[in-house]
Structures are given as structure tokens and as C-alpha cells.
Image (spheres, grey):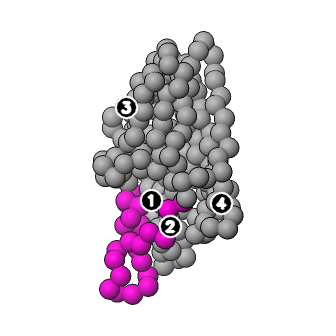
């Protein structure tokens, strides 16, 4: 869920990331302006946490980029990560439970999950889920796409994905993105 203000969305109307951050440069500017998409070689710090019972699916994030929108009238930027999830363990698939996006600079976060999506999102053993990567997936997710907001056009973000393996075991994929220096 993506809300203007993103303070838990309490009492706010969910909106798409593009409509939440409109260009303020001129009245003839497009409704949104993408400030930047992160380079394809980000500095990634990843870890997977396994919770018993037994083995779990092993997820890996690939092709991470961050679309940065804005700034809006309040000087805030919208951040929408694009990525693929690959199951690399080869024995079990995984159903995505929640995706949390955290901006440590502003201490703001936003979560989305199956309650908003309405459909379970599953990665088969040795499979790839590209729903969070493609334009078609972003259109389908609409305001349920993972994202958050902050004050920098060059964000540092933490993405935490919780999932349930096909055998019921829980797992977490924790990825930190640090904007490359010099870009």
C-alpha cells in the first residue's frame, strides 16, 4: 500500500506511487517525473534468516533498481523498488508474505502484502517471480506495490521480505541498498 504521507496509511486514501509525487516544475510538465533509476550494479548487503521447522526455500533478489519520483510539493521523494525474486535452493517454493521498505535516513517504512494484493504471490522451486520487476506487474500491483518515501533523491533503503516455504517454514530475505558514490 502506498499512501500520501506514509504514516501507516491510517485514515489516508491509498494512491499509486506515480500520482503521489507529481512534478512541481511547471504546469506543462508531465504528471510524474522520474528523477533517477539506480544503476544496475548497486552495493547489496543480503542475508537470509531461516526459522524452524526444517528446511526452507532460499530466495535471492536480482536486478534491483529503485525508481525515484518527485520531489512533491513538500520536498519529499517516492521510492519504488523493482526486483526479481529467484528461489535457489531447488527443493521448495515460497509464498511471499510481506515486503517492508525502510528508509533509515527518515526512519520511515511501509509494508505491503497479500491482503492488499488479493492473490498469493509464489516463487516455485528453482523459479523466478518477476511481478515486482516488470511494468505489467507494477500496473497490476498499483498502489499495493512496495515503496516508501523520503527526503533524498539518492536514497539508501532496506528491503525485508518475509515468506513461507511450501513446507510451512518461515524465511526472511533482508537486502540493503546503498546509493553508489559518484553517481
Residue 3 circle label: 1
Residue at the disc numbered 3: 120
Q: Secondary structure at mark 3?
A: loop
Relative to 72, does residue 91 appear above or below in the rendering? above
Spatial distance from mark 2 to mark 1, Cα to Cα?
A: 21 Å
Residue 150 coordinates in the image, percent (x, y)? 58, 64
Q: Earlier in the sequence, mark 4 or mark 3?
A: 3
Mark 1 in CB contact with mark 3 (< 8 angstroms): no
Residue 139 seen anywhere in this rendered image of the structure:
yes
Tell me the residue at 41%/61% (across/down).
17
Q: Earlier in the sequence, mark 2 or mark 3?
A: 2
Tell me the residue at 64%/23% (across/down).
50
User: Main SS type for the magenta part?
Assistant: loop
- 16 or 57, which is in the foreground? 57
Residue 4 coordinates in the image, percent (x, y)? 46, 64
Q: Secondary structure at mark 2?
A: strand
Displayed quadrant of residue 143: bottom left
Left or right position of 76 against 126: right
Tell me the residue at 46%/50% (across/down).
82
Tell me the residue at 58%/46% (across/down).
159
36 in magenta: yes
Residue 177 coordinates in the image, percent (x, y)? 63, 52
Residue at the disc numbered 2: 36
Amino acid at each position: 500500500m502506498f499512501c500520501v504521507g506514509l504514516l501507516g496509511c491510517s485514515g489516508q486514501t491509498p494512491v499509486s506511487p506515480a500520482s503521489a509525487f507529481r512534478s512541481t516544475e511547471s504546469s506543462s510538465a508531465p504528471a510524474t517525473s522520474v528523477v533517477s533509476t539506480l544503476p544496475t550494479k548497486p552495493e547489496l548487503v543480503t542475508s537470509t534468516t531461516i526459522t524452524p521447522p526444517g528446511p526452507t526455500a532460499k530466495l535471492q533478489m536480482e536486478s534491483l533498481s529503485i525508481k525515484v519520483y518527485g520531489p512533491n510539493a513538500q520536498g519529499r521523494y517516492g521510492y519504488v523498488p523493482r526486483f526479481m525474486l529467484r528461489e535457489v535452493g531447488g527443493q521448495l517454493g515460497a509464498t511471499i508474505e510481506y515486503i517492508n521498505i525502510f528508509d533509515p535516513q527518515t526512519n520511515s517504512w511501509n509494508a505491503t502484502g497479500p491482503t492488499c494484493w488479493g492473490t498469493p504471490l509464489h516463487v516455485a522451486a528453482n523459479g523466478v517471480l518477476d511481478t515486482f520487476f516488470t511494468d505489467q506487474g507494477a500496473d497490476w500491483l498499483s498502489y499495493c506495490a512496495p515503496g516508501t518515501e523520503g527526503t533524498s533523491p539518492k536514497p539508501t533503503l532496506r528491503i525485508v521480505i518475509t515468506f513461507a516455504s511450501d513446507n510451512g517454514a518461515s524465511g526472511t530475505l533482508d537486502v540493503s541498498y546503498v546509493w553508489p558514490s559518484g553517481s
